[in-house]
């Protein structure tokens, strides 16, 4: 059989195998050549496509997977974006969105009309291609962990504005060519867009919260998120918008329900980056016919004009906001790089223009070359900007103190909601330290084999949850005659900094202890921080955090540790955190938050003292988290009224997610200060104001 008769490959198994080989080996090869992966995927598509070696035809699989990949890019941009930064930079995003539409549109229209001798209708349609862009290089941003950068947020927000305006131009020209000048059409389109946006904003979060609270199967949750993404894309298409805008809106509204670093986020990123997005890039490459350069000078001229004009327009559109908002040159390069790539919107415009007879084959082929070149320029620019921004962040950010003793131990028992404990621990851990978690199961030494097996299954489940979020977990199983002593021994052997464990559940009416014997034994046997958790619903669906802080809590040695943990958790959830505390405590607390966690939405309510839990009863809803900061006896902030906290919690908050924190009672004397070391605060603004309380903290710290 002649080899030529084998190609193009039509067998689905061989098609998928060849695509997977490209996805696997292209990054390995390109890393050696210092070429971004995205460029490799595009060039691989050119090479194997019908206009290259003709190994594969661009069949329906590339259309389906490619469309999913495009929606995935926009959805990930919405899910990964830092909403606090996005709100902070929304005006900048609006300005960039206007500049990145106006400048390329004006340059494109003038070049096409006066240089390429096109009529104004076709010129404006090509100009709309210049203005629209696709976040093809966003995968590079995600890989470098720069989704929080302000220039990235500006680019993502600007994408929605410029793509919407470009698609409106496409819709207007398309309707004019078809002779639809009826104003009723535009009225209904406006109504449809408003209904779509309203439905996504108000219905999607409520539906998602209900689903996540009802179903905790990871596969079901992933399928649900994908279904919501496609539903939003369909809704946008029905409303007259492009589906990619719907996917982005879905990502924005589901952002807070899919925390960064969660197992669900890990699954979403893995599937998108491993399959769908590479499929989309390869499929785009297969559209490109490089032979147009040897068929005639016209296609070459048109391609050069389009690449030069589009690149110049996008560069000016990024340069102006850079100067207005005093961005660093790397941030300006990031703006340009993310907005330079043209793919989805450009393909939609050129195909519509070709079908309407406004474009000939020369424009069509030149546009495909335009897509390839802009994607290459975009990926190179974003790769360079990302590397420099990472270096700059390391030089300017607050250094992570290697002396930080963070090591979280999580005692677990069988038949317990392990997932919520692991979620809380992963939200509180410092990802910059990149330290794993320690899962512990302690059973009585005379326990049955079934109890031992149940404990091992519990640890295996915890390890799977942590690994799915790319977090290392060390598991330990031990026997003990006393459960609390077993946990304390494990705490000391592992030199753990704190404990996170589930709250005691009363099994019998005769059980009069709120905390249970194990917790009471831990409180008496260790001075390390203990966090008790009672989650009545999935942690990622919580909408607000209320923190009740006792008087003089700032004098405790473990004050900054629990503030750090809660602040990190609030930042990941993206929810508002309200501190119910005294004015002098809030003064210290607010300075710490302004220095280390300026992005979280923190508020302050003056505490009513011993009656604060009773006063708050009407403010705390079932989808809120109540955090009560307690204290051990003989500590500075301890009050006899603390003995009544269990009664108040049971009376006023029986169905509310609860967290009770017992801070470190003593701080160990180390050679180098840690993040929680009172000496660190000596560098804060207002140090002179707080020398009094600092002296007291230092005295206790040295104890």
Image (cartoon, rainbow, N blue to C red):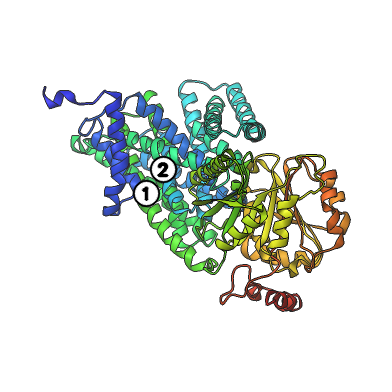
Query: Element under label 2?
Result: loop
State which quadrant residue 355 falls in: top left
Q: Is residue 528 left or right of residue 72?
A: right
Residue 547: x and y in percent read 75, 54
Q: Nearer the viewer, residue 522 or 684?
A: 522
Q: Is residue 580 left or right of residue 221?
A: right
Q: Is residue 640 left or right of residue 285?
A: right
Q: Is residue 593 above or below residue 469?
A: below
Q: Is residue 505 above or below residue 384?
A: above
Residue 443: x and y in percent read 61, 47
Cα distance, mark 1 to mark 2?
A: 8 Å
- Tag 1–tag 2 contact (CB < 8 Å): yes
- The residue most toward the left is 2
Write the residue at 38% across / 54% down.
383
Q: Residues within 10 Å of mark 1 (few under 14, many from 20)?
A: many
Q: Quadrant of the C terminus?
A: bottom right
Task: Pick whichever of labels 1 and 2 is earlier in the sequence.
Answer: 2
Q: What is the number of the mark on residue 379?
A: 1
Query: Element under label 1?
Result: helix
Q: Quadrant of the N terminus?
A: top left
Write the residue at 51% across / 29% down.
172
Q: Is residue 476 above or below residue 392?
A: above
Residue 660 at least partly seen: no
State which quadrant residue 38 falls in: top left
Q: Is residue 577 above or below residue 180?
A: below
Write the residue at 40% across / 52% down.
382
Q: Residues within 10 Å of mark 2 (few under 14, many from 20)?
A: many
Residue 581 at least partly seen: yes
């Amino acid at each position: 059989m002649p080899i030529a008769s084998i190609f193009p490959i039509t067998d689905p198994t061989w098609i998928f195998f060849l695509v997977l080989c490209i996805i696997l080996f292209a990054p390995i090869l390109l890393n050696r050549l210092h070429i971004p992966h995205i460029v490799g995927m595009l060039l691989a598509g050119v090479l194997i496509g019908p206009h290259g070696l003709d190994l594969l035809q661009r069949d329906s699989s590339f259309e389906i997977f490619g469309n999913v990949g495009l929606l995935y890019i926009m959805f990930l941009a919405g899910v990964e974006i830092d909403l606090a930064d996005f709100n902070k930079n929304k005006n900048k995003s609006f300005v960039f969105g206007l500049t990145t539409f106006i400048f390329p549109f004006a340059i494109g229209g003038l070049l096409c009309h006066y240089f390429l001798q096109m009529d104004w209708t076709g010129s404006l349609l090509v100009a709309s291609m210049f203005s629209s862009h696709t976040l093809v290089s966003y995968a590079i941003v995600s890989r470098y962990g720069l989704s929080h950068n302000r220039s990235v947020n500006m680019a993502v927000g600007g994408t929605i504005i410029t793509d919407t305006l470009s698609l409106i131009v496409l819709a207007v020209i398309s309707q004019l060519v078809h002779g639809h000048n009826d104003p009723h059409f535009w009225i209904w389109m406006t109504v449809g867009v408003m209904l779509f946006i309203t439905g996504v904003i108000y219905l999607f979060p409520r539906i998602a919260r209900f689903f996540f609270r009802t179903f905790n199967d990871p596969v079901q949750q992933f399928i649900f998120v994908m279904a919501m993404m496609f539903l939003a894309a369909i809704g946008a298409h029905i409303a007259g918008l492009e589906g990619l805008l719907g996917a982005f809106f879905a990502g924005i509204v589901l952002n807070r329900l899919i925390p960064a670093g969660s197992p669900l986020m890990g699954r979403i990123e893995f599937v998108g980056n491993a399959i769908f997005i590479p499929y989309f890039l390869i499929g785009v490459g297969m559209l490109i016919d490089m032979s147009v350069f040897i068929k005639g000078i016209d296609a070459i001229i048109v391609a050069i004009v389009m690449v030069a004009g589009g690149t110049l327009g996008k560069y000016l559109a990024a340069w102006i906001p850079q100067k207005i908002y005093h961005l660093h040159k790397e941030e300006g390069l990031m703006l340009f790089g993310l907005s330079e790539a043209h793919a989805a919107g450009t393909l939609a415009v050129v195909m519509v223009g070709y079908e309407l007879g406004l474009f000939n084959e020369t424009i069509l082929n030149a546009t495909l070359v335009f897509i390839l070149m802009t994607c290459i320029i975009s990926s190179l620019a974003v790769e360079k900007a990302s590397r420099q921004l990472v270096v700059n962040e390391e030089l300017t950010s607050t250094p992570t103190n290697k002396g930080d003793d963070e090591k979280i131990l999580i005692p677990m028992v069988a038949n317990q909601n392990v997932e919520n404990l692991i979620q809380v621990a992963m939200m509180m851990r410092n990802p910059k330290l990149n330290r794993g978690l320690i899962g512990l199961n302690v059973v009585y030494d005379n326990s049955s084999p079934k109890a031992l097996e149940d404990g091992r299954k519990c640890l295996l489940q915890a390890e799977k949850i942590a690994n799915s979020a790319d977090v290392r977990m060390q598991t330990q199983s031990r026997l003990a005659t006393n459960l609390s002593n077993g946990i304390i021994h494990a705490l000391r052997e592992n030199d753990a900094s704190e404990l996170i464990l589930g709250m005691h559940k009363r099994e019998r009416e005769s059980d009069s202890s709120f905390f249970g014997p194990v917790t009471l034994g831990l409180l008496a046997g260790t001075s390390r921080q203990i966090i008790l958790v009672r989650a009545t619903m999935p942690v990622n669906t919580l909408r607000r955090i209320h923190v009740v802080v006792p008087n003089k809590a700032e004098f405790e040695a473990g004050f900054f540790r629990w503030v750090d943990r809660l602040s990190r958790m609030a930042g990941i959830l993206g929810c508002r955190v309200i501190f119910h505390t005294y004015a002098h405590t809030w003064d210290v607390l607010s300075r710490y938050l302004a220095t280390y966690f300026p992005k979280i939405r923190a508020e302050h309510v003056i505490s009513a003292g011993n009656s604060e839990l009773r006063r708050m009863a009407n403010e705390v809803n079932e989808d809120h988290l109540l955090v009560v900061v307690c204290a051990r006896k003989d500590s500075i902030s301890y009050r006899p009224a603390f003995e009544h906290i269990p009664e108040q919690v049971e009376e006023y908050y029986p169905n509310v997610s609860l967290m009770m924190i017992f801070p470190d009672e003593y701080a160990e004397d180390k050679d180098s200060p840690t993040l929680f070391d009172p000496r660190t605060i000596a560098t804060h603004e207002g140090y002179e104001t707080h020398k009094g309380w600092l002296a007291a903290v230092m005295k206790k710290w040295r104890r």
